[in-house]
Amino acid sequence: MELDPLLLSRLQFAFVVSFHAIFPVFTIGLASYIAVLQGLFYKTQNPAWDRLALLWTRVFAVAFGMGVVSGIVMSFQFGTNWSNFSQAAANFIGPLLSYEVVTAFFLEAAFLGVLLFGRGRVPQGVHLFAAIMVALGTFISTFWILAANSWMHTPAGVELVDGTFRVTSWIDAIFNPSFPFRFAHMAMASFITGGFVVAGVSAWYLLIGRDVEANRKALSMCLWMLLVLTPTQALVGDFHGLNTFEHQPVKLSAMEGNWETRRGAPFLIFALPDQEAQQNRFEIGIPYAASLILTHELDGEIPGIIEAPPEEQPPVAIIFWSFRVMVGLGLLMIAVSLVGLTLRRGGRIYHSRPFLQTLRLMSITPFIAVLAGWITTESGRAPWLVYGMMSHEEGVTPSLTGGMALFTLLGYMAVYAVIFYAGTYYLTRVIRYGMQEKEEDKVIDDFETPKRPWSATHTPFDDDPSKEGA
Amino acid sequence: MEMFDLSLIWALIIGFGIMMYVLMDGFDLGLGILFPFAPDEDARDVMMNSVAPVWDGNETWLVLGGAGLLAAFPLVYSVFLPALYIGVFLMLAGLVFRGVAFELRFKSRRDRRGRRLWNLAFSGGSAVAAFAQGAVVGTYIQGFETENGVYVGGPFDWLTPFTLLTGIGIMIGYALLGTTWLILKSEGYIQQWAYRLTTPLLLAVLVIFAIISIWTPLVNDVVWERWFGNLHVIWVLPALTLLCMFTVFWASRRGYEVLPFIATLGTFLFTYLGLVVSKWPWIVPPNYTIWDAASAPESQLFLLIGVLFVLPFVLVYTFWSYWVFRGKVRAGEGYH
């Protein structure tokens, strides 16, 4: 079998970016949550807020560290595997990615250290300010990355001169048509991810009866936020979909599994898209629903996938199903938030074991939903790297062989497997030993640790041997 | 924008960034290379603690350099990275492993297997990353096979006897930066150990740098013309390099603590400037100059504004973090 460097490069990019995305999507929401906790502590002086802020700052430190480490790899991917794209699009993509680095640099230089190590050493107001600036910094980073990504979906403000993109309007290019929707959708996804993780961990602490006062506050707060955000996210997602309908109709048809242009198209709940036959082998749908959602008319016209020639069609089955995973999990998150509302009476959200257990399990769902959403939108851009202007094939590194691409793909998988195992293992330990009255700090033996992001936590990596076998 | 040569400004900024990276990440990578040979676990703790507060600040220069190249000189980015594909992967894997080792080694108990694994990740990652960086320098001197701005060479063109030598040269050079840094930051038997290693490492660096310096003009006409043409003033650079090397030797024999490190930095600085002088203005040799490789002026300008704003903050922060963590590191205590 011939190894295809193009396919392997796409797989590699999907793998490293998915792995990387897990961390920022969580830390962006968490940073804002920490700022809110610091603000509440500053205002009320209730130490429960401070205890929560301490725990979540530690978790933030570890997740942020993982995000930075995996982000270094990302900044080289464009050159190693997509050198023609880098060369062609550098005039726009280059400054944007650099601005992201510069922002992160500035953030780390100025405020992260104060947030992680300033507790009790700088005035409370300064500490709060640092927390707000860190939260703001995560949004500015998101801004640059999503502007670059959105531009690849809906390019604007550029002209193609001799195979190179020249920027004609920075404003048009940065605030390209899909950017506001993608940014809103992603920012809310980050808040929801942070919300479900905090809710899940608080639920677990309540189940084992640890720091009940603080964790009740945290849980209640998260559930209120989720009650507002999860339905709003569905609405924002709908607007994002309408934007896609306007600018990338083929992607939207693939999401709907709609091959032929037709009026009164159904919303398919289940289908087996067959790319070769250019039709679905089996489908169950709600009549007229897709037309109604997208055109707000029962017999509105939905263009079919076959409007694009087969070589310009994205992989329909992947898009169709990843979209449904995202929407399904989104509905599940709305449902859980609503159940939380009904259980408020009599404080059952704090006592109902099934509900608390459900929240515990739910903490992983936003991550899956986010990845599914990214798979939908990125696969939906295929075969284009820059929609309608540059294809994957034109963008890939010409000198790249299948063997080289396979080597690094397997290599990155191995490296990240080790890192991911160590990181999540350590993160679960931080949480497991968190929020206890007896500080776990004393457990560490020989060293007060150096000033590193993870030094904000003191949980040891392995168990105390003296307690083993007990 | 005819008033300013933006490409020249960007070449200076990125050249400065690379120099900062080599000087600063050099000694912490060097400590990683020396790690397996340390006298004991206490010494390893001291070595790691002496750079732990600053190493990631050091590495952000690499990320800034990479992103800056994409924005200002995309041709460099889109030729170097495909040509060095495997080498770049090895360097990144090495940097990732040692980055995580920095975080987790201190959280593993001494007597456990975890500690030994993190030690291995730290030293192995540092050695591989240092070698790969040396090979990048060697490949740059060698030049790239390109057609119409696209790399057309093979996957292992970067691995030749010459780049092997530059790779090993950088490893040993970084190790020398490591020992002289350790002389500065440690005391007692650890410092004695660092003193003992300095002279042999210095000799090895001298030999390898000499071979590279003789080899380069012999295989490369442009470099030959540069050094044996009319530009006699540039011979001051190798002279200063040798002076710095002698100072390292003399000062470490005399038991000075600060001077060996400063002089080693000087050795690297003047060697680096010598390389720049040899290749200027060819940024993707043998075919492209900095002006050929530049992005559009409006793009260079757009980013320049942000970088000029942030660079002073970064420099102040860098200086500040070294200042805060100045002084000796002792076994059994870290920074508070």
Image (cartoon, coloured by chain):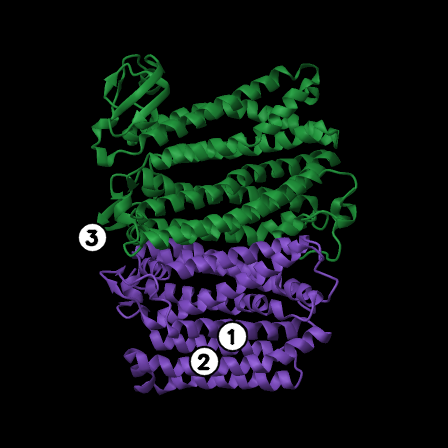
Chain colours: A green, B purple
Indicate the position of residue B88 as horizontal and vertical percent values: 42, 59
Looking at the image, do the residues carrying marks 3 and 1 touch, with CB atoms under 8 Å apart? no
Q: Looking at the picture, do discs 2 and 3 lie on one chain?
A: no
* Amino acid carrying mark 3 in the image: Asp
Q: Image check: B199 left or right of B142?
A: right
Subunit of label 3: A
Query: With respect to residue B52, does A188 lie above or below?
Result: above
Query: With respect to residue B92, does A65 lie above or below?
Result: above
Which residue carries the number 1 mark?
B173
Which residue carries the number 3 mark?
A162
Q: Find residue B209 and name its label.
A: 2
Subunit of label 2: B
Indicate the position of residue A143 as horizontal and vertical percent values: 44, 42
Q: Looking at the picture, do discs 3 and 1 lie on one chain?
A: no
**Which marked residue is nearer to the observer: mark 3 or mark 1?**
1
Whether residue A156 can be seen here = no
Mark 2–mark 3 Cα distance, whole angstroms, equals 43 Å
Of the image marks 1 and 2, the number of the one nearer the N terminus: 1
Residue at the front extreme of this rendering: A1
Report the residue at 50% width, 40% height from top.
Answer: A22
Quarter occupied by the C terminus of chain A: top right
Whether residue A21 can be seen here = yes
Q: Image check: B125 left or right of B135?
A: right
Indicate the position of residue A404 as horizontal and vertical percent values: 36, 55
The residue closer to the viewer here, A85 or B263, is A85
The residue closer to the viewer here, A199 or B315, is A199
